[in-house]
């Protein structure tokens, strides 16, 4: 492809994921000659696996609340993009493309049951092509071409694809099988951009003392928290669902605290301290104690196992009684105060021990990346290299679990595509 001799700017968008698809669509809508280049054989590979194949499109509610879910510096950077293309703007876009959506009680937005992530990718891809963008797949690029200090195009080995502007939207390095292998960071670093050290975010937790036989057990609506150590100060918590795996913990709770644990481990706290589960998050220690004692008075001959069974799955009963050092067949009337306290302590704070690792490659997103100080937050344009734009996970942004990161991709992609098309 060569630069269009007309006044239409030529824009190459690298990466056919969430940010890249929106960037290509918006740039084409703004009148640019757009080519979207994806190294995989198909578009939207990471979207296809998001939300277990259902795709958590965004988070509902006022865009200001979505913005505040990010860390302060990230929220400040995202402000112009979020208000330029909000969560409601994105939903209006997908609804116009033929999809219908619904909001879960926790605020997460998904396609309705008759649609899947595959339909989301299909709608996005169709919109990109309908806007007039040219799509190339199965083209792995090797770098950014620079001439006289500004972007000239992109390279695929010895081949040059010329363009006036280039948008890097290649994602991070999580789930490398989907094609996110850190290419954008290498290219940006070679061009003089600072890369903030990479850290896992929204990743499972591999425990030092994992229980493979617990794999597949899920807990609904619990709190997972991390402390500096046994009995130490709590420094992060997340409420939601939790899943045991062969190596440790996954699910929204684990993902929700993984970034902070990884940072503590990197700063020298062995194992990130300890993680523990609160199986009865709606009750204080005292309220749970009162609840158990009240049930005992009502059913004095019932076993203590039956009295607290509502707090955990059957497969975890035996491990819990071992951890509490209480005989589960003890009749309520015979339960000592000391045993009751130990039992309540376990239900309210069952220690899973220290974390062995927070695997970077298994994170849904990666913290770190291109320094936000070197990108114009209003336009997503590089402050270092003329003709270069960034959007999506390649930037040093990592929000919480729940659709926030996809919204960051949609919003920054929209802005990058728009300004790559219209700025002179």
Image (cartoon, rainbow, N blue to C red):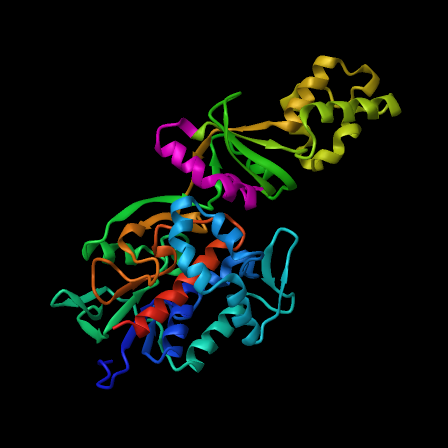
The quarter of the rendered structure image containing the N terminus is bottom left
Q: Is residue 252 magenta?
A: yes
Q: Nearer the viewer, residue 232 or 389?
A: 389
Q: Position of residue 51 (x, y in %)?
A: 55, 56
Query: Does residue 11 lie above or below 376 as drawn?
Result: below
Q: Nearer the viewer, residue 133 or 272?
A: 133
Q: Nearer the viewer, residue 375 or 202?
A: 375
Q: Nearer the viewer, residue 67 or 254?
A: 67
Q: Position of residue 94 (x, y in %)?
A: 54, 71
Task: Identify the residue at image location x=61%, y=70%.
Answer: 100
Q: Is residue 235 magenta?
A: no
Residue 371 visible, this orientation:
no
The secondary structure that dominates the magenta segment is helix
Highlighted range, magenta: 243-271
Task: Identify the residue at image location x=52%, y=41%.
Answer: 254
The quarter of the rendered structure image containing the C terminus is bottom left
Q: Quadrant of residue 387?
A: bottom left
Q: Position of residue 19 (x, y in %)?
A: 40, 64
């Amino acid at each position: 492809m060569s630069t269009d001799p007309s006044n239409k700017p030529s824009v190459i968008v690298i990466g056919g994921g969430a940010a890249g698809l929106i960037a290509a669509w918006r740039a084409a809508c703004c009148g640019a000659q757009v080519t979207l280049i994806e190294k995989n054989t198909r578009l939207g590979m990471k979207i296809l696996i998001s939300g277990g194949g259902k795709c958590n499109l965004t988070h509902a509610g006022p865009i200001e609340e979505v913005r505040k879910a990010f860390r302060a510096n990230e929220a400040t950077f995202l402000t112009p993009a979020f208000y330029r293309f909000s969560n409601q703007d994105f939903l209006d876009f997908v609804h116009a493309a033929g999809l219908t959506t619904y909001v879960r009680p926790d605020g997460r937005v998904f396609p309705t049951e008759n649609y899947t992530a595959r339909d989301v990718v299909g709608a996005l891809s169709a919109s990109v092509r309908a806007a007039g963008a040219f799509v190339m797949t199965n083209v792995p690029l090797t770098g950014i071409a620079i001439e006289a200090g500004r972007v000239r195009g992109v390279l695929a080995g010895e081949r040059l694809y010329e363009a006036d502007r280039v948008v890097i939207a290649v994602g991070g390095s999580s789930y490398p099988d989907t094609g996110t292998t850190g290419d954008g960071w290498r290219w940006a670093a070679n061009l003089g951009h600072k890369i903030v050290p990479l850290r896992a975010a929204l990743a499972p937790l591999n425990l030092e003392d994992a229980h493979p036989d617990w794999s597949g057990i899920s807990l609904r609506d619990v709190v997972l928290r991390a402390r500096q150590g046994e009995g130490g100060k709590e420094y992060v918590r997340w409420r939601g669902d939790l899943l045991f795996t062969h190596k440790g913990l996954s699910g929204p709770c684990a993902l929700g605290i993984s970034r902070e644990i990884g940072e503590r481990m990197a700063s020298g706290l062995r194992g990130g301290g300890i993680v523990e589960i609160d199986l009865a998050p709606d009750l204080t220690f005292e309220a749970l104690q009162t609840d158990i004692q009240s049930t005992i008075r009502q059913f004095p001959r019932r076993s203590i196992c039956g009295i607290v069974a509502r707090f955990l799955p059957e497969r975890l009963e035996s491990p819990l009684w071992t951890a509490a050092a209480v005989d589960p067949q003890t009749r309520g009337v015979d339960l000592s105060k000391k045993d009751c306290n130990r039992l309540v302590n376990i239900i309210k704070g069952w220690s899973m021990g220290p974390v062995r690792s927070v695997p970077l490659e298994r994170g849904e997103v990666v913290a770190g990346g291109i320094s936000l100080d070197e990108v114009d937050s209003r336009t997503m344009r590089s402050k270092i290299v003329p003709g270069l734009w960034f959007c999506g996970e390649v930037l040093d942004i990592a929000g919480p679990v729940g659709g926030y990161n996809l919204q960051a991709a949609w919003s920054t992609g929209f802005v990058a595509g728009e300004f790559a098309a219209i700025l002179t």
